[in-house]
Image (cartoon, helix red, strand yellow):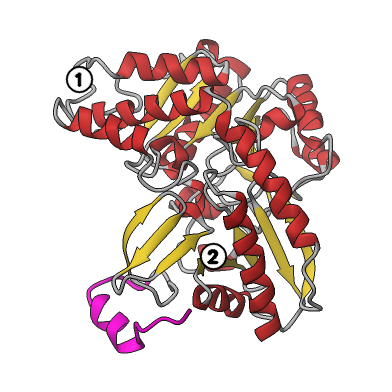
Amino acid sequence: MSTHVGPADIAELERHVAPNYHPLPVVLAEAEGAWVTDVEGRRYLDALAGYSALNFGHRHPALIEAAETQLRRVTLTSRAFHHDQLGPFCDDLSRLTGLGSVLPMNTGAEGVETAIKLARRWGYQVRGIPADQATIVVAARNFHGRTTTIVGFSSDPTAREGFGPFTPGFRSVPFGDAQALADAIDETTAAVLLEPIQGEAGVIIPPEGYLTEVRRITRDAGVLFIDDEIQSGLGRTGRTFACDLEEVRPDVMILGKALGGGVVPVSAVIADPDIMDVFTPGSHGSTFGGNPLACAVGRAVVALLETGEFQARATEMGARLATGLKGLRSDRVREVRSIGLWVGIDLEPGVPARAVCEGLLRRGVLSKDAHERTVRLAPPLVITEDEVDLLVAALQDSFDAL
């Protein structure tokens, strides 16, 4: 399968678009389930799923119905007033996470910023850290968003360069190294902020027992464990949350991406009231956070997850995908990491991941490169056995053609 959209066409389409992305040369117009269609009618298997924002596929009927129903009622009020979707949405998320207090926001980065503010205020008011001295321990190669505070503790030079000065108060340790994390905690530490699996870094899976040890260390030290499940949560790994893989209960959980069902941006920070209640009226807020449309879609997302169907599909289809990837015949592949329907394929030096993604595009599959040498796959959880096999075959063909 070949594409007919040329460089001149792309340049014309994007003449007023800021150049902060370098997309593949395809122009999408329609989508349903695991498939998207370009402006010329060609179909592609979506093996990226909006960086996990589309866990339930494009335009899932239950999510579209929830959105359409709410669109006919009310879409935005203000948190200056109550509305009839907010309380039930927060009840649903509390039940799903096992944590008792929900603060809705819009984007993942907003959720992380909210959690940072929460941890700092809790550190001062509850842990007794001296004013303006709170620190948070983070992991190298993290990806928590794009705000100036967040990129300030990123180890990715592309994310950081030219955006300083940065917010102080963060200590970075190697991901997966529990001893280094423990050594970084002192009397000024309010929290440890981690992705249980690092998505943007290339689907980096920590050693077995790492999350359990992080939970023990933070509990013993009396600091918060903030679990960023924005990409890893809501079914992607075969469990509702990645922390469930080790039956770990964090103090604070951050959700986003798939929480909006691929329909609207929705994020949330969830914690128990003894933590969340350090926020007081006026100390934090959002014009659109917790709006009626977002809450209605978010409730529908929780209802889908409570069936267990999508977690089971991620486990079953993920096992099939992992088996297929083990059978790849190519000396261009250095390592394959997979968990549920989430895969990082590291390539040998000199093999550009972008070229593999372009080869997949020509074969009707959409994917994304990470840090030049990793191909990331995160197909919707609605993917079928035949579609998994198609994905594996397209990968083999792409490697063969390099």
Q: Nearer the viewer, mark 2 or mark 1?
A: 2
Q: Earlier in the sequence, mark 2 or mark 1?
A: 1
x, y (%) of residue 234? 54, 34
Residue 51 lies in the magenta stretch: no
Q: Secondary structure at mark 1?
A: loop
Residue 367 got which mark? 2
Left or right of 15? Residue 374 is right
Residue drawn at x 76%, y 78% is 332
Name the residue that disc number 1 marks: 80
Left or right of 358? Residue 285 is left
The disc labelled 2 sits on which kind of residue? Ser
Residue drawn at x 45%, y 33% is 114
Residue drawn at x 29%, y 29% is 66
Quadrant of the image occupied by residue 187: top right
x, y (%) of residue 196? 68, 40
Residue drawn at x 22%, y 74% is 16
